[in-house]
C-alpha cells in the first residue's frame, strides 16, 4: 500500500486549528484536489457538502477558493449526509465530491472525505496523487479559467427521493412507530422526511444542531437517549445515525442495542432466505466471530477486510458480492448505493423485518456474539503497535492464554490518535484479563 502522509482510514481528520485541520491547509488541499481531479478538454466541477459543525463554514470557503484557483467549478450542497454527496456526485456527473466532516467525533474535530466521480471512496493511489500536489506550491490558473461557485438548493429533496427509491414501491412503514436520533448532525433535515413519507409515525431526537452539539450524548455512539425515548414513546424501534449519516445502529422495543454486526447478520440471513444474497458477506478484522460462525451455519461465505468501509467495498467488488459492514454500523449494500449510508441501511433492515414477518429479536436470534472487549489507548501520535517487540511478546502471551477459541487484534485507529486493543473468545473473564494487560503494555510503550 502507498504510504500516505495525511490520509487515514477515512479521509483526513483531526482537531480544528491543529495541523492539518487549518484554513491554510484546506485552501491548499482544495487546489491540490482540483489538480488531481480535473481533466483536460472539459469543464470540471466538484461538489462540497458538510455536516453541522461550526467549523464547516470556514473550511467550505477555503476549499472553494482552492478549487477555484485550480480552475474547477464548485457546487455547494450545504449540510447533507456523507452518502448524499456520494449520490449527488454521480447524478451531477461531477469530477468528485468532498465532504467536510469528522463523522462521529466531537465538534472540535473536523475532516475531509472524498468521493470519486463514481461515488466511491478514493483508492490509495488517488489519495497519494492529491498528496503529491500538496507538496507543490499553489499556482493560480489564468483569470479566464478560474472556477465558479453555485449553490444547489434542491439537494435535500433529491436525496430523500433517492433513499425511498432503494426499497420497492409497495413497501410501506404504515403502523410502525420509529424514534430517530439524528445526532444533531447532517441527517436532521432529511431522515425524518424519508421515514414519514414511507408511512411511519416518527418521533425525532437529536435534530436541533447548533454547530457545537453534534454527537453530544446522542447518535450512534451514545444510545442512552434513544433507549429512553423508545421506552417513553413505546415505539417499535429506535434508529440512531452518526454525525454525518453514514452509520446506523438500532434499539429494539425492549431497549436492547442492535449493533452493526447484528444488522449485518439480519440483512444477510434474510436475503439468503429470499435467494437475494448473491454470494457471501464481507466484514472487517473487528467483526465479532459470532457473525462468521452464524453465517457459516446457514451456508454463507464470510471474508474479513481491513477496517474501513472503503476496504469492505474493495472486497465486495473483488468477489462481486453485495453485502458488507462493520460493527460500528457502517453498512455497504452494493445493489442500493456506492458507500456506507445510514438511512438506506436502516430501510433495508426494516424491509427485512417486514418481509420476514418476524420481530427484530427473532431475526437476530440465530447469531450469538462471542464475548469481546476493546480498550482504546490514547497516544500522542499514531504508531504501528506490531513494530514494538514488547507489545508483540505481550500479544503472544495473550494469544496463548485464549488458545484456538479466541483472537487478539491490535491496530492503530485511522481516524483518531488511538491504539485499539481488542480480544474475543469463549470466556469473558479471560478476555477482560488479557486485553487489560495488553493495554497496559501498549500504554507503557507509547512514544
Image: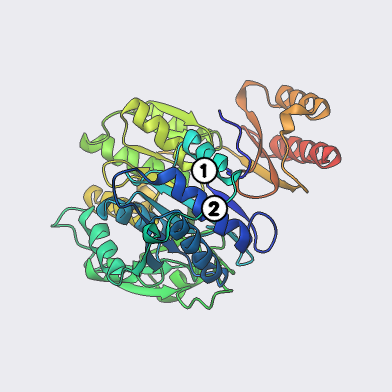
| Residue 344 vertical position relative to residue 332 in the rendered view, above or below | below
Taking 180 as reference, is 15 left or right? right
User: Which quadrant is the N terminus positioned in?
Assistant: top right
Q: Do the residues labelled 2 and 1 touch (CB within 8 Å)?
A: yes
**What residue is at 64 percent from the left and 66 percent from the top?**
108
Under circle 1, the secondary element is: helix
Question: Who is closer to the viewer here, 135 or 274?
Answer: 135
Taking 416 as reference, is 203 left or right? left
The residue that mark 1 highlights is 130
Residue 5: image location, x then y, percent: 63, 41
| Residue 133 vertical position relative to residue 294 in the rendered view, above or below | below
Residue 301: image location, x then y, percent: 38, 25
**Tag on residue 29?**
2
Taking 399 as reference, is 249 left or right? left
Which quadrant of the structure image shows residue 245?
Answer: bottom left
**Tag on residue 144?**
none
Question: Who is closer to the viewer here, 47 or 237?
Answer: 47
Mark 1 neighbour class, 10 Å CA radius: few under 14, some 14 to 19, many 20 or more:
many
Mark 2 neighbour class, 10 Å CA radius: few under 14, some 14 to 19, many 20 or more:
many
User: Which quadrant is the C terminus positioned in?
Assistant: top right
Under circle 2, the secondary element is: helix
Q: Could one spot residue 227 in this view of the protein?
A: no
Taking 366 as reference, is 412 left or right? right
Q: Mark 2 or 1 closer to N-term?
A: 2
Amino acid at each position: 500500500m502507498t504510504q500516505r502522509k495525511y490520509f487515514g482510514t477515512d479521509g483526513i481528520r483531526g482537531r480544528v486549528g491543529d495541523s492539518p485541520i487549518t484554513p491554510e491547509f484546506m485552501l491548499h488541499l482544495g487546489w491540490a484536489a482540483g489538480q488531481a481531479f480535473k481533466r483536460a478538454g472539459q469543464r470540471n466541477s466538484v461538489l462540497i457538502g458538510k455536516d453541522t459543525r461550526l467549523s464547516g463554514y470556514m473550511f467550505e470557503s477555503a476549499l472553494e477558493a482552492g478549487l477555484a484557483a485550480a480552475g474547477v467549478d464548485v457546487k455547494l450542497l450545504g449540510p447533507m449526509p456523507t452518502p448524499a454527496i456520494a449520490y449527488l456526485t454521480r447524478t451531477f456527473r461531477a469530477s468528485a465530491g468532498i465532504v467536510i466532516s469528522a463523522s462521529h467525533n466531537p465538534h472540535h474535530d473536523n475532516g475531509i472525505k472524498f468521493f470519486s466521480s463514481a461515488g466511491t471512496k478514493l483508492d490509495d493511489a488517488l489519495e497519494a496523487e492529491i498528496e503529491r500536489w500538496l507538496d507543490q506550491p499553489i499556482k493560480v490558473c489564468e483569470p479566464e479559467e478560474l472556477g465558479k461557485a453555485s449553490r444547489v438548493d434542491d439537494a435535500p429533496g433529491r436525496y430523500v427521493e433517492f433513499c425511498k427509491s432503494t426499497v420497492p414501491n409497495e413497501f410501506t412503514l404504515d403502523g410502525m412507530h420509529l424514534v430517530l436520533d439524528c445526532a444533531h448532525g447532517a441527517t436532521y433535515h432529511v431522515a425524518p422526511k424519508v421515514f414519514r413519507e414511507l408511512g411511519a409515525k416518527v418521533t425525532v431526537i437529536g435534530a436541533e444542531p447548533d454547530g457545537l452539539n453534534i454527537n453530544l450524548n446522542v447518535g450512534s455512539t451514545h444510545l442512552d437517549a434513544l433507549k429512553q425515548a423508545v421506552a417513553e414513546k413505546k415505539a417499535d424501534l429506535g434508529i440512531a445515525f452518526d454525525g454525518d449519516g453514514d452509520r446506523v445502529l438500532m434499539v429494539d422495543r425492549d431497549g436492547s442495542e442492535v449493533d452493526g454486526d447484528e444488522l449485518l447478520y439480519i440483512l444477510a440471513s434474510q436475503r439468503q432466505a429470499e435467494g437475494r444474497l448473491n454470494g457471501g458477506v464481507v466484514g472487517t478484522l473487528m467483526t465479532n466471530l459470532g457473525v462468521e460462525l452464524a453465517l457459516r451455519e446457514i451456508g454463507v461465505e464470510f471474508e474479513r477486510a481491513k477496517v474501513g468501509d472503503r476496504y469492505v467495498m474493495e472486497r465486495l467488488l473483488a468477489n462481486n458480492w453485495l453485502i458488507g459492514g462493520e460493527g460500528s454500523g457502517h453498512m455497504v449494500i452494493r445493489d442500493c448505493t456506492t458507500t456506507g449510508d445510514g438511512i438506506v441501511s436502516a430501510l433495508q433492515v426494516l424491509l427485512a423485518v417486514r418481509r420476514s414477518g418476524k420481530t427484530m429479536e427473532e431475526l437476530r436470534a440465530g447469531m450469538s456474539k462471542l464475548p469481546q472487549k476493546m480498550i482504546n489507548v490514547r497516544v500522542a501520535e499514531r504508531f504501528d503497535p506490531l513494530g514494538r517487540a514488547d507489545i508483540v511478546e505481550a500479544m503472544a502471551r495473550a494469544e496463548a492464554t485464549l488458545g484456538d477459541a479466541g483472537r487478539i487484534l491490535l491496530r492503530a485507529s485511522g481516524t483518531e490518535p488511538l491504539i485499539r486493543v481488542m480480544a474475543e473468545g469463549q470466556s469473558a473473564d479471560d478476555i477482560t484479563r488479557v486485553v487489560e494487560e495488553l493495554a497496559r503494555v501498549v500504554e507503557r510503550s507509547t512514544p
